[in-house]
Image (tube, rainbow, N blue to C red):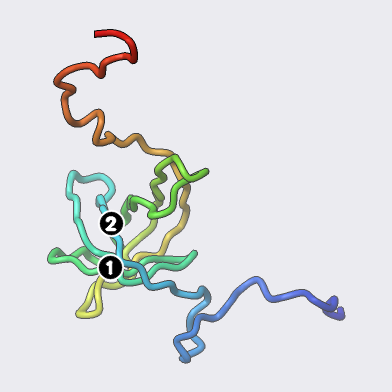
């Protein structure tokens, strides 16, 4: 069957040059929270890179390959320039070595998240005066 002009393959190799990657990696400098499923163990780390298929991060803690995890990442872009987002997902640890912990993401979803603004965090001392009133 002939390929239609202008169509592209579903899988995109990244720019690493080794041709093994199915998804393009994007360097990121964000925090990540991983929780090993069926336990209370939580690992905090810093993301090195992320793709649509996985995430690699560094942490002082080790997760065993094969461990199923939930992950949460506070996303750096606001929805409609106003609403904070959090990327949540589930997957499993592929490897954990001197290059970091690699997790294959099996499913993911963006959620809106509540944040406490500076105005709400600091108590108001005196209510602002209304114009023309004392």
In this view, 85 is above or below 10 = above
Q: Residues within 10 Å of mark 1 (few under 14, many from 20)?
A: many
Q: Using residue 125 as the reference point, say whether residue 18 is left or right of it.
A: right
Q: Pick whichever, 101 or 46, lies toward us.
A: 46
Q: Pick whichever, 9 or 36, lies toward us.
A: 9
Question: What SS does tag 2 mark?
Answer: strand
Q: Residues within 10 Å of mark 2 (few under 14, many from 20)?
A: many
Q: Using residue 117 as the reference point, say whether residue 9 is left or right of it.
A: right
Q: Using residue 2 as the reference point, say whether residue 37 is left or right of it.
A: left
In this view, 54 is above or below 42 = below
In the picture, the quarter occupied by the N terminus is bottom right
Q: Residue at x 39, y 47 (%)?
A: 86
Q: Position of residue 93 (x, y in %)?
A: 31, 64
Question: What SS does tag 1 mark?
Answer: strand
In this view, 20 is above or below 12 = below
Identify the disc placed on residue 97: none
Q: Position of residue 17 (x, y in %)?
A: 47, 91
> Disc 1 marks which residue?
57
């Amino acid at each position: 069957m002939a390929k239609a002009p202008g169509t592209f393959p579903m899988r995109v190799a990244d720019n690493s040059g080794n041709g093994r990657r199915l998804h393009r990696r994007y360097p990121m400098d964000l925090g990540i929270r991983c929780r090993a499923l069926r336990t209370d163990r939580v690992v905090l780390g810093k993301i090195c890179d992320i793709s649509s298929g996985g995430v690699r991060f560094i942490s002082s803690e080790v997760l065993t390959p094969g461990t199923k995890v939930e992950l949460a990442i506070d996303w750096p872009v606001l929805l409609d320039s106003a609403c904070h987002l959090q990327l949540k997902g589930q997957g499993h640890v592929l490897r954990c070595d001197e290059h970091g912990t690699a997790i294959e993401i099996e499913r993911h979803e963006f959620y809106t998240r509540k944040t406490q603004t500076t105005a709400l965090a600091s108590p108001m001392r005196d209510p602002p005066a209304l114009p023309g009133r004392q």
